[in-house]
Image (cartoon, rainbow, N blue to C red):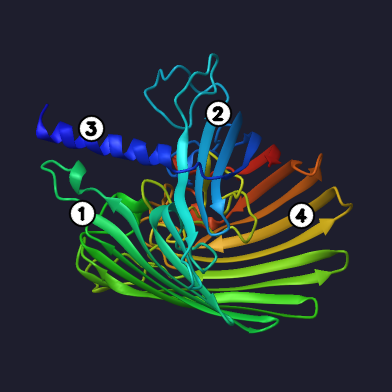
Amino acid sequence: MGFKKKVIVASATAALSVAVAVPAMALENEFHGMYRLNSVIDNFNGDGPYDPAGKDKKAPTTAYFEQRARLMYIAKANDDLKLVTHFEIDSRWGDNSYNSNGKTRNNGGAIGADQTNLETKNIYLDFNIPKVPVNMKVGIQPYNDSFKGIMFDADMAGALATASYGKFTNSIGFFRFNDDGPNLAPKVAAGKRSRDMVALDVKYQAAANVKVGGAYYMINDDRNFAATPGFLNQQAGNTNITHTLGLNAETSFGPVTLDGFFVYQFGNLEAPVNRHISAFAGNVGARVKAGPGTARSEFLYISGDGGNQTSHTSNAFQSVNSVDTEHGFYNGDLQILFRDPYAMTTDNAIVYSSNNQDQGVVAGFIGYDMPFTPKLSATVNAGFAAVAKDNLHKPTNLKTGAANSSNYLGTEVSTHVDYKVYDNLTAIARGAYVILGDYYKGVALNGEDPRNPYMASIILNYVF
């Protein structure tokens, strides 16, 4: 037997001896999860940003069923130590079976099923450090920014330390989004072609009804990727570094709650030309107890860039994307104009990314939530959006041969009615309609105006 094999055998024997000698640890086993079925009729479906340019003005009406199951298992050793695991299974009824398309996710709804499609969402260790007020989360975990998700809201691998003392809650984290070096040809050492983030977050309870906070995120991208067409047409290049610094606050008085944030970005983009980043975003939101329900409003501004690549400064807000967008502004509760909070495999929107193809966005939202009974409630919403700065991503009016002067994307009106069948099971009927703005005038085939998007859906949502 070779030396290495002897070492392996000896190590395994020692580990087995320890396992036999030590009494079994009592674990608390927790199981949680959800199942969601979404049945949809619409003329607005696909992936990514809405793009009617050069296509038939009559987008086809489709009818489909999608389902998602999430399963969470938590192995809890004690109040200070637990392992959290979270898995997901997605499919569209009738999509594929028996692994016949070679894909291993978002499949398995065709007759026969038998598809390999279990996805890992989270696997992380959650523990408190003895004798100090610090909690650690280490592994693939959910993490979102402190600015309503306009920059990132995703599952990511990293380490996060959080300390609470007095009126402060502070956290510091390191996350690795990508490490592509070992996959290149020729291979590059791990960590040499990576995209990493350092996150600092501070929250302070200034008074019983006042919260203030601040956050800093530094993203260093050393992947040496080309500028286009990556990141949903977002400006990106080689060896980028982005600094995001922002403040947030929330206060309430009587029936009114106000919140908001301001964010400034700076740094460098190395391609297509070396450019400095100078971008910002701001938001104000309000909730008011009005009559038997609650009225809501939000205003959002995210800066954009005109695309002059000879300029040494870019004003395009740099959100976090991968092969898909890894963020979303869901506070407006819209279904088409912005990303749908109930979207699954079919996930698209007119404003799909807060960067919005470097154009940024100006948007406003209003809504009203009405509880009729403990089981029945309804919500109505309306919202508008325009690009903050047009650029070459603006579609061409095929009648005039030039882009339209209007930056107005459209207005959405939507509603949903929720009925609690059981405490854990809710049936939701939804509808949405968007009146497209002149940004899209004449951009469809033969210079026609694209038809207004609509969607109707019924959802069953079970949470346990």
Residue 426 position in % (x across, y down): 75, 42
Image vertical order of residue 236 relative to residue 183, above or below = below
Q: Which of labels 4 and 1 is toward the front? A: 1
Q: Residue 399's x, y, as percent?
A: 44, 48
Provide the secondary structure element on which disc 1 rests.
loop
Residue sticking out furthest to the bottom: 206
Write down the residue under mark 1.
Answer: 193
| Near-viewer residue (373 or 390) | 373
Q: Where is residue 284 in the image (x, y as percent from the top left)?
A: 60, 74
Q: In the rendered structure, which disc, 2 or 1, sits on the residue that comes first in sequence?
A: 2
Residue at image coords 75%, 77%: 256
Q: How far apart are marks 2 and 1 (CA)?
A: 35 Å
At 52% from the left and 38% from the top, the residue drawn is 88
Residue to which mark 2 is pinned: 92
Q: What residue type is labelled 2?
A: Arg
The residue drawn where x is 13% and y is 41% is 185
Residue carrying label 3: 9
Classify 10 Å Cα crowding around label 3: few (below 14), some (14-19), many (20 and above): few
User: In the picture, residue 299 is in which quadrant?
Assistant: bottom right
Q: Nearer the viewer, mark 3 or mark 4?
A: 3
Determine the CA span between mark 4 and mark 2: 27 Å
Three-letter amino acid code of the residue under disc 3: Val
Query: Which residue is at 55% across, 69% downward?
Result: 300
Q: Are marks 3 and 4 in contact (CB under 8 Å)?
A: no
